[in-house]
């Protein structure tokens, strides 16, 4: 079974600051996904990373994937309050159709 | 947004009663999934389907069954609900193309008293 660990689990940061959320996984995979969830809402897809070295950016968020280290990062640049949410990473096996989720990082951006 | 609906959106039931949750998609995607979300656990896969009448178990399948008689519908049944099945249930769909990205339904909040 594939294990996915995120850290930190909780993150409180001031507006304008930078920070990184880490996602480690236990088994070889080349498919890594990042989702955002607002309180009481569903999950919204942010990034799909499909190869080693993949980097994607959308606004103040940038995601990267290092398949050799089994690590993905979600970097937040100059945080704003609207980024407050819970962020999940998910990994899919190279073969198969199951997705494994991390426990999520609850981000609060303080004005 | 991907066309995924779940019904009901909220349900309160009593221990021992059967419950069926429905997921309906309009995207004609092959794969459909049922997850439960609980604090501290992220999302955990209950069952998934890779085609009509083709289903498989996930990591927390005990106490749940599924059926998929049409491409667009995936049903999750709790044969005899227990309080430990109180949770938020999400359906997701995924296609064959590209990175098989998942799209999620709005969720069903189930409370078992």
Image: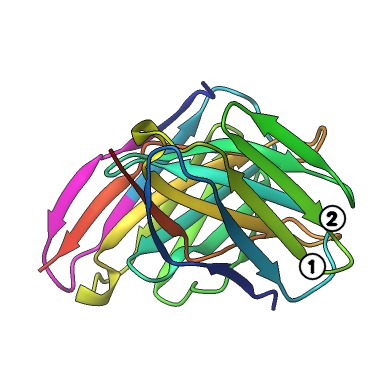
A40 over A1 or under it: above or below: above
**Image position, residue A13 (x, y; %):** 38, 51
Q: Measuring 90% from the left and 52% from the top, which residue is drawn there?
A: A52
Side of B24 where A29 appears, left or right: right
Q: Is residue A70 magenta?
A: no
* Span shown in magenta: B6-20
SS state under label 1: loop
SS state under label 2: loop
Side of B31 where A45 appears, left or right: left
Front of the two marks 1 and 2: 1
**Image position, residue B66 (x, y; %):** 49, 57
Q: Residues within 10 Å of mark 1 (few under 14, many from 20)?
A: some
Residues behind callouts 1 and 2 on a single chain: yes
Res A1 quadrant in image: bottom right
**Image position, residue A108 (x, y; %):** 33, 49
Q: Measuring 61% from the left and 47% from the top, which residue is drawn there?
A: A75
**What residue would you read off at disc 2?**
A30
* For marks 1 and 2 on the same chain, the one whose residue lies earlier in the sequence: 2
How many numbered marks have been drawn onto this rendered protein structure? 2
Separation (CA) of disc 1 from disc 2: 9 Å
Res B51 quadrant in image: top right
B35 over B102 or under it: above or below: below
Q: Residues within 10 Å of mark 2 (few under 14, many from 20)?
A: many
Res A29 quadrant in image: bottom right
Q: Nearer the viewer, residue A83 or B86?
A: A83
Protein chain holding label 2: A
Q: Nearer the viewer, residue A97 or A31?
A: A31
Q: Is residue B53 visible?
A: no
Q: Is residue B83 visible?
A: yes
| Marker disc for residue A70 | 1
């Amino acid at each position: 079974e594939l294990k996915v660990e995120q850290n930190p689990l909780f993150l409180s940061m001031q507006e304008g600051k930078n920070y990184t959320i880490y996602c480690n996984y236990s088994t070889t995979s080349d498919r890594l996904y990042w989702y955002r969830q607002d309180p009481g809402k569903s999950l919204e897809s942010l990034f799909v990373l499909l190869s080693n070295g993949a980097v994607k950016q959308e606004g103040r968020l940038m995601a990267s994937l290092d398949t050799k280290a089994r690590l993905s990062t979600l970097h937040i640049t100059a945080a704003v309050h609207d980024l407050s949410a819970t962020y999940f990473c998910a990994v899919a096996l190279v073969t198969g159709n199951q997705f494994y989720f991390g426990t999520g990082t609850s981000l609060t951006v303080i004005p | 947004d991907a066309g995924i609906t779940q019904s009901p959106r909220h349900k309160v039931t009593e221990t021992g009663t059967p419950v069926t949750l429905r997921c309906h998609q309009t995207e004609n995607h092959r794969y459909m999934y049922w997850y439960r979300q609980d604090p501290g656990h992220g999302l955990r896969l209950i069952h998934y389907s890779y085609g009509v009448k083709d289903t498989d178990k996930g990591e927390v399948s005990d106490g749940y069954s599924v059926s998929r008689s049409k491409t667009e519908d995936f049903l999750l049944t709790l044969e005899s609900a227990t309080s430990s099945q109180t949770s938020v249930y999400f359906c997701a769909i995924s296609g064959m193309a590209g990175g098989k990205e998942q799209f999620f339904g709005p969720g069903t909040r189930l409370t078992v008293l």
